[in-house]
Image: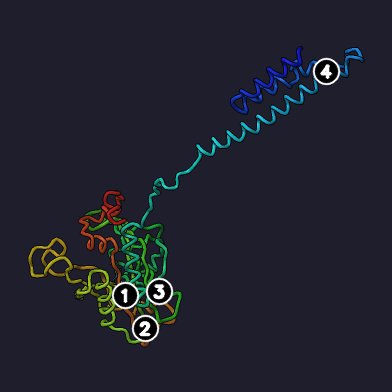
Amino acid sequence: MNPDSVQSEGLQAIAVAPDTAALEQVRIALLGRKAPLVLALRELGSLPPEDRGPRGKVLNQVRQSLEAALDARESELEAAELDDRLRRDRIDVTLPGARVERGFAHLIEQTGREILEVLVGLGYRISDGPEVDTVYRNFDALNHAPTHPTRQATDTYYIDEHTVLRTHTSPMQIRTMQSQPPPVYMATMGRCYRRDTPDATHTAMFTQIEGLAVDRGLSLAHLKGTLLAFAREMFGADREVRLRPHFFPFTEPSVEVDVSCFNCARDGSPCRVCKGEGWVEVLGAGMVDPALFGYVEGYDPELWTGYAWGMGVERIAALRHAVPDIRWLWENDLRLMEQFG
Ligand code: PHE
């Protein structure tokens, strides 16, 4: 083994190693356990004593110069590789980012929130109630006769004899009066269920908003004023409301409420919203039948009167946006939904 050539060839190999991985191979070849230089160092002990000193000195000098060159080259290559990595990883903050799709509330939810917002503005408190409720609250305490037709299993989904999927949000009138003394100004939104055959204006699951007010001296005029405020917020400042006599078991008198058409001149010419009538039916309402107070505690019918109403959120959303079939609102076809995003 010639130390001079090991040194010069070694330094040459170190100088041309292109990267740290290659340099590591060079290090093993030059200073690894099987490297000629290392073997020679190990064999020093078997040399005659007078040769050991000079030979050892030469070999160690070679080793030191190789080690120093390896370390220097390693730092150099590491720095170059880091530079390279930084250059490749550089982020161009001016490039457009990956777009994150934002969701939005469904039209039914949007419409419902808008209605509740109006009612909150009028002083109503929002309550939330269960979609599964008792026959007692859904029918009995709402003054439905035992033989009332909507109690039938052909109209109503029964969970068991005493429990139904609520057919309207009106059981929340009872829940509210069961849980607090008067006065009451309550509004609630939620899903309801009826065994209807689906068509353009009916779905087996739908959304209602219910309002209930109980206070001293409330009259039909207060109901009408409340609904007028609602109608003008939702359908336009020029709207009027009209009450037509109707029947509900839990209100007396009961009315159906129409809003003056927001789509036409109301002169009898054809209109897809009001069919030329000039009025559009939007909800059912009435004065709370005093009989209901008999089903709850603390509501003396001599002291308190009230009014209530219930409306279909799908119907109102469909009317405002000219959606011809409320089933479409439940199909979640994005081509329709995204128009309301
Ligand atoms: N619950 C009635 C319905 O679903 C609507 C209504 C609510 C009527 C409150 C009067 C008072 O048709």
Secondary structure beneath label 4:
helix
Crowd rating for badge 2 (residues with CA inside 10 Å; few <14, some 14–19, many 20+): some
233 over 273 or under it: above or below = below
* Residue depicted at x 61% and y 35%: 79
Q: Are marks 4 and 1 in contact (CB under 8 Å)?
A: no
- Measuring from the top left, give residue 104's x and y in whole percent: 36, 56
Secondary structure beneath label 3:
strand
Residue at the disc numbered 4 = 42
Disc on the earlier residue, 4 or 1: 4
- Measuring from the top left, give residue 281's x and y in whole percent: 20, 68
Q: Amino acid at mark 4?
A: Arg
Number of the front mark, 3 or 4: 4
Q: Amino acid at mark 1?
A: Ala
Residue at the disc numbered 2 = 215
Q: Amino acid at mark 2?
A: Asp
Disc on the earlier residue, 3 or 4: 4
Number of the front mark, 4 or 1: 4
Distance of label 2 from label 1 (alpha carbons):
12 Å
Number of the front mark, 2 or 3: 3
* Disc 3 Cβ-to-ligand 1 distance below 8 Å: no
Viewer-proximal residue, 291 or 330? Answer: 330
Viewer-proximal residue, 20 or 79? Answer: 79
Residue at the disc numbered 3 = 125
Disc on the earlier residue, 4 or 2: 4
Left or right: 47, with 33 as reference point: right
Number of the front mark, 3 or 1: 3
Q: Amino acid at mark 3?
A: Arg
- Quick one: which residue is furthest to the right in this view? 49
* Disc 1 Cβ-to-ligand 1 distance below 8 Å: yes
Q: Are marks 2 and 1 in contact (CB under 8 Å)?
A: no
Residue at the disc numbered 1 = 308
